[in-house]
Amino acid sequence: MTDIESLKGFYDRYPEEFAAWREVIDVVETTAAEFGFREIDTPAVERRELYEIKSGEELMDQTYSFEDKGGRAVTLTPEQTPTRARLVQQRKDLKTPIKWYDTSKRWRYENVQKGRDREFFQTDIDVFGIESVEADAEVIAVAATIYERLGVADRVEFLINDRTLLESILSAYGIDNTEAVMGVIDDKEKLSDAEFRTELLGVGVSSDIVDNVVETTSVRGPIREEVERMAAIAPDDEDAQAAVDRMADLADALESYGVADACKLDLSIVRGLAYYTGLVFEAFDSEGELRALFGGGRYDDLVGLFGSQDVPAVGFAFGYSTTRELLKKEGEWPSEALSTDVYVAAVSDDVREAALGFASELREAGLVVETGLAGRGLGGQFGYADSINAETVLIVGQRDLENDEVTVRDMASGDEEQVPVEDVVGELV
Amino acid sequence: MTDIESLKGFYDRYPEEFAAWREVIDVVETTAAEFGFREIDTPAVERRELYEIKSGEELMDQTYSFEDKGGRAVTLTPEQTPTRARLVQQRKDLKTPIKWYDTSKRWRYENVQKGRDREFFQTDIDVFGIESVEADAEVIAVAATIYERLGVADRVEFLINDRTLLESILSAYGIDNTEAVMGVIDDKEKLSDAEFRTELLGVGVSSDIVDNVVETTSVRGPIREEVERMAAIAPDDEDAQAAVDRMADLADALESYGVADACKLDLSIVRGLAYYTGLVFEAFDSEGELRALFGGGRYDDLVGLFGSQDVPAVGFAFGYSTTRELLKKEGEWPSEALSTDVYVAAVSDDVREAALGFASELREAGLVVETGLAGRGLGGQFGYADSINAETVLIVGQRDLENDEVTVRDMASGDEEQVPVEDVVGELV
């Protein structure tokens, strides 16, 4: 006897639990598919150098990297974006917009804690090749529609920013080291008001405009309203007005998609400095109890690092961990229970064959059907039917069959009725 | 610019190709689900020792094994059976039959050739905890139903054997080193008749019964007929008669499942000596052009190696590689093309918002809908709609809208009709 456990941070999902996972993954994928995103499938293992192009040392340290038997340095994929960039670069013939989704596992060697596993599912959803606000709005619309369909639209808000808007407003304030200031703004959430001000002063923001920066990055409201305020800050700054116009166009597009109400402009959303070039957004629990659900944005400079084409891109990686917490809190995590349409019970061995026949017919009609494999008595069969939450038990007995009938038992009510053999499928489908 | 390729034996599947894969995987999974198999999800990485319990050195040599950052010897899963055995052992409370399916990737560092990739999909389908022939028949029925639904039932036959039947008949012939003889029979396919005879003599089969062994292992026919012949070989041997009876019961069960015609008894099917304890089967291209599609069987002694419970098991791992070849040969591999229900085209920018609104409504109704993200003219939009195989294009124009109408174009026929705005969803769903 041996007792080998799974690795820390890796999970075994038995059918009851995974039925719920599958239901949520299906909502995410179906939504993406209905928006015209197409499923791709990519390797779980890549050459290590693929990740070195864009990832910092920290991320590389968290990868599962090793040498394969051919001496190649390889890495279990910690994120799909580099792979997608590779795929886009490989095919110059792809028509734009290139709209892809995929749900697969990622691996990161992190300290295991709540919401941080070493193996986890992620659904990547991106539009490549299009720079328009419509593309920006579409990825936010996909995300918002997912939460609508998961039943928690009222608990989720999307905080939206545009890096070019923030940058141009900082410039309009006379700040020239905008990069450093945005770095401080990126940390704002973790800082007290006093600390935030100190840090701003520390990177050289003059004391007379610290208030302006604090105020600008404290805004969180409907995009249309807030964007008008932004327009008024720098009425004569061309860059700022262009960014303001783009944000106003985004607000229009979000409205057309019917998801504007879930979105708020928040100029403190930065999402690091390395990656995003325009739109950035994060989905939050509107009651503020949970960490960010996930985030995304526009990254027009990234794909070009992986080949000869410059290809704009906007998208997000949907992680399931915090969303699962939210759904559980709200009672919207799907029931972790098996579901079965019909259990076919054989009263005795001599009708086993007939029972299997009914099971086959019902499956042909698309039902989930189990039948006795164990030669158990009727009591044992009912116990098993119960354990798999069979809605109906079809009881096949010799005497019934002689009358061309079977008994159909509704498991919820306990009601039984005799049904002519030829009506069984029609009755149960 | 960099040009990093995917690893040899690992594949990038773009949407067109993966749409076909997904369709085939869906058939396999839906069939398993309708038979009451439940989806599980298990780690892609396990402790190396999990695989050392059952795998020979050869298989271990073909694994992707390495040390993780915590110094643990780990392996990318080359097969799911050890993991499943671990899961069964971990939960003493599971009701039997335990019926599981799962499609996920496996990794083996093999020499890449046709049909042998280093990363590949596999769907594992097993029944744990039940020893009956009904369980044996059910897994074969699932496999046969999959090929029926894939449209190639007439090109696939299941060659079926029972290790205990073969062994008891060899014993009845007076052979006592049955293990060694079965080893030779396992190689029969690769040997000429003369070589086979020589090998049999080589492991000590006496010359007067070599003919018997050759004859017995050359049988390939309907189970019922052949099993009667087998019964006559050793009428007084209890073990042989028990094995014959079990095979006859299996034939009955296969008949009840409606899949008996696809099955043939073939006593030369052994599938190695390490693993299977009873039923063994292989799915073959009935025209003999392709390698085996996949195989499976009963392995009652395996799960017990992984913990304190002895748990009988029967099942198979469905690989896609040869099946894909077969489907392509038969013209049944699904079309590698995108499919889109509706493309919503905006005639001008001022109706873009209305176009997005129609797209949202149609998606709510469950359709796959794309709409312009790029601010293209109508010609460009039609070109794109064509490239995604849109069935219908909804043309939204200012003048139409003023009359509360839109234009619906059937892309196959080119026919266009005006449709009142309020009827659009009803018309297109």
Image: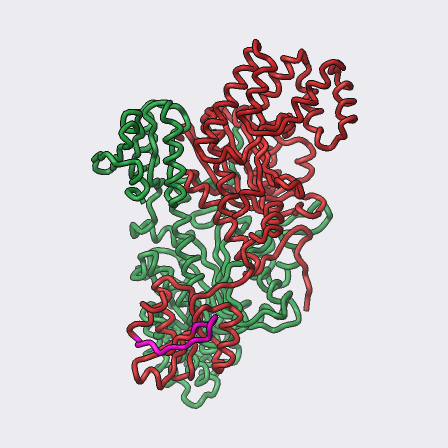
Chain colours: A red, B green
- Would residue B400 be found to the left or right of residue A225 on screen? left
Q: Quadrant of residue B396?
A: top left
- Does residue A198 sit above or below A61 in this rendering? above
Quarter occupied by the C terminus of chain A? bottom left
Q: What is the x, y in percent for residue B194?
A: 39, 68
Left or right side of A141 for A9: right
- Residue at x-position 44% and y-position 61%: B33
Where in the figure is residue A338, as x and y percent of width and height?
A: 51, 63
Does the magenta-highlighted stretch encompass residue A416? yes
Residue at 56% x, 71% y is B95
Front residue (pair B195, A281) = A281
Where does the N terminus of chain A fall, quadrant-wise? bottom right
The magenta segment: A410-421
Would residue B329 be visible to someone looking at this image?
Answer: yes
The tally of labels here is 0
Q: What residue occupies the far bottom of the structure in this picture? A: B236
